[in-house]
Amino acid sequence: MRFTKLLFIIFIFSFGTRLSAQTWVVPDDQKAITAPFKFTPEMQKQGEQIYLKNCQSCHGLPGKDNWVKLTPPPGDLAKEKAQIQTDGELFYRITAGKVPMPEFRNIIAEDDRWWLIAYIRSFNPKYIQPNPVAKAAFAGRTVTLAMEYSDPMKKIVVTATEQLKDGKTGPAASVEIMLFVKRYFGKMQVGDIKTTNTSGKAFFEFPADLPGNQEGYVDVSATVNDPKNAMKTTPAQANFAIGVPTLKPGLTETRAWWSTRGKAPVWILLTYTLSVIIVWGFILYIVYSILKIRKLSNG
Amino acid sequence: MEDKNTPHAPNESETQKNSSRRDFLKNLGLAGVGVATGAAALYSGHIFEAKKDVSGDQKVLLTQDGKLVQVDSLEIKALEKTGVALHEVEGREGIPGRRWVMVTDLSKCRNARKCINVCQDAHQLRPEQYHMNTLQMQDTPATAPYNMPKNCQHCDNPPCVAVCPVDATYKRPDGVVLIDNERCIGCRFCMAACPYSARIFNWIEPKDAANYQGQDYNVELNVPQKVGTISKCLFSADRLREGKLPYCVEACPNGVYYFGDENEDAVTNGTTKETVRLSKLLRDNGGYQLMPELGTKPRVYYLPPKNRLFPFEEATDATPEKV
């Protein structure tokens, strides 16, 4: 009996240590990253707007301790647990996410993520920003994307070129590309991630049934899938007439039972008018007959 | 003796001539001044007359604060619509080319009640008034219990609109069903007609009514709320106009809600902000509508509460279920 109890305790402890082992580790090279610019009060204000839109629903307002009780707890970002982290750590966590925290890589632009950090730091009076490191000192690959629609292939061709060591540009091979179309509330990914071939090209089949605007135009954008933030990339944007032309009438334009008088179904209007005419016609006929009988009796 | 050749004589006649010329000049000057004065008087009179009403066509008008005034027809100027009047026009026209649609994933709802709280804050509702509420469901004793957020279904065949006698509740071209509290007479026909019980009635003075006094009524927000009228979920029509997701959708911490445009075949998750294809989402996850047999054609879809293995606890606003 005592033995089983002991086993149980050991089991609980091992479970606890395993839980704590599942912490969210940020790679060392990411920790060292600093913002590419000096934070200003304007950036903090912009960051506040982004925070209210994307972060408040879980983290609550900074300093108010009104975060949502999730597992693991999101925590208050004005508190020490968040503030002892480097800017690079915060940036990595926002960018990469970890379930249940969403990944904001494709949702918040890079500069906007730094503004967010500027806002979070404004709750820490002891915070001194490390010197901004200009982006020019970047040593990784510099990839620029271009996009065109190939009519014979019926595919979107994304061409990636990169800056080579000798100052020339050449095709960027094995770069992961993601394709998005613009929708009202955000960008929607089309197809899977494609890798560029040796000539720096990636081919995307565009769904045949995706709605475009009135003329079938869709705003398409291609970005590099770079979760480790190891490249300096320039996304491509284009507007192709490859969607299904969509011009659906407003939902109040057709005649309907529930609509106002002007939009009532014709059969209702006809039936109603006819029944009114019949009823009144009958009444008038009776009155006319009575008058006729009176006339006859008088005669 | 009179010597006409004396130097005086011509002088005298000259004096006479001079004096007559002087008089003439004097008179001319006087006349000139007179004419100028007269002309000026006439001119200023003309301006005065011009300033006065010219048409003589008087109109009787009702001012915004309810006073009857008489104004010359020439003085009436058309103004650009602002404030309440602009909201009235915009609120009826909607956003062209859109058909809003909402998808609620029941497998994810853990009754955090964030959607309810943010909705009540935005629409000036008391804690017991719900545009959006989470119901506790258990279909059979053997199946897993689940929470079901339920709001107005924004039907394409809305029974509530059909019964409104004053055109206060209406359907917009973009699919949203709204209620105009300025037109509502409080007959509550729509409440009786709605099969989803989505509507609430302001029986008593709305919450914090004093704080909202004098604020322009916004038909896309139902604020300020009005006692004796109906209120209901608006799909946050004011936020859609700004390109933002509805209050409830954005406040959810568990990724329950998707919202988007059916015409674009895309919906965006309020928590992860991920945009996915509406048709695929509904097809792959067995999307369904509430009471489709009634023919109301709701604009809200539900995804079934699959894999809901976590326990179902009693949760209220005071003690939300752990999320």
Image: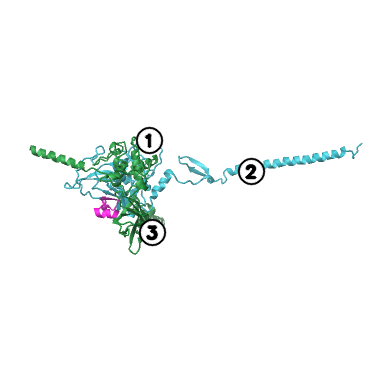
- Give me the disc on residue B269: none
Q: Which chain is cyan?
A: B
Mark 2 = which residue?
A: B43
Residue A147 shows up from this direction: yes
> Could you confirm whether marks 2 and 1 are on the same chain?
yes
Q: Dot 2, how many residues are within 10 Å of its Cα: few (below 14), some (14-19), or many (20+)?
A: few
Mark 1 residue element: helix
Q: Dot 1, how many residues are within 10 Å of its Cα: few (below 14), some (14-19), or many (20+)?
A: few
- Give me the disc on residue B210: 1
Label 3 vs label 2: CA separation? 62 Å
Q: Give the magenta part as a residue range.
A: B278-302
Q: Colour of chain A?
A: green
Q: Chain of mark 3?
A: A
Identify the residue at image location x=91%, y=38%.
Answer: B3
Label 2 sits on what residue type? Tyr
Asked if residue B286 is among those painted magenta in the image, a careful observer would answer yes
Mark 3 residue element: loop
Image quarter for residue A218?
bottom left
The quadrant of the image that shows the N terminus of chain A is top left
> Between B81 and A145, which is closer to the camera in this rendering?
A145
The quadrant of the image that shows the C terminus of chain A is bottom left
Q: Judge left or right: residue A166 versus residue B21.
A: left
Label 3 sits on what residue type? Glu
Mark 2 residue element: helix
Of the two numbered discs 2 and 1 on the same chain, state the one appearing first in sequence: 2
Q: Judge left or right: residue B57 versus residue A5.
A: right
Asked if residue A37 is among those painted magenta in the image, a careful observer would answer no
Mark 3 = which residue?
A: A215
Quick check: A60 above or below A254? Answer: above
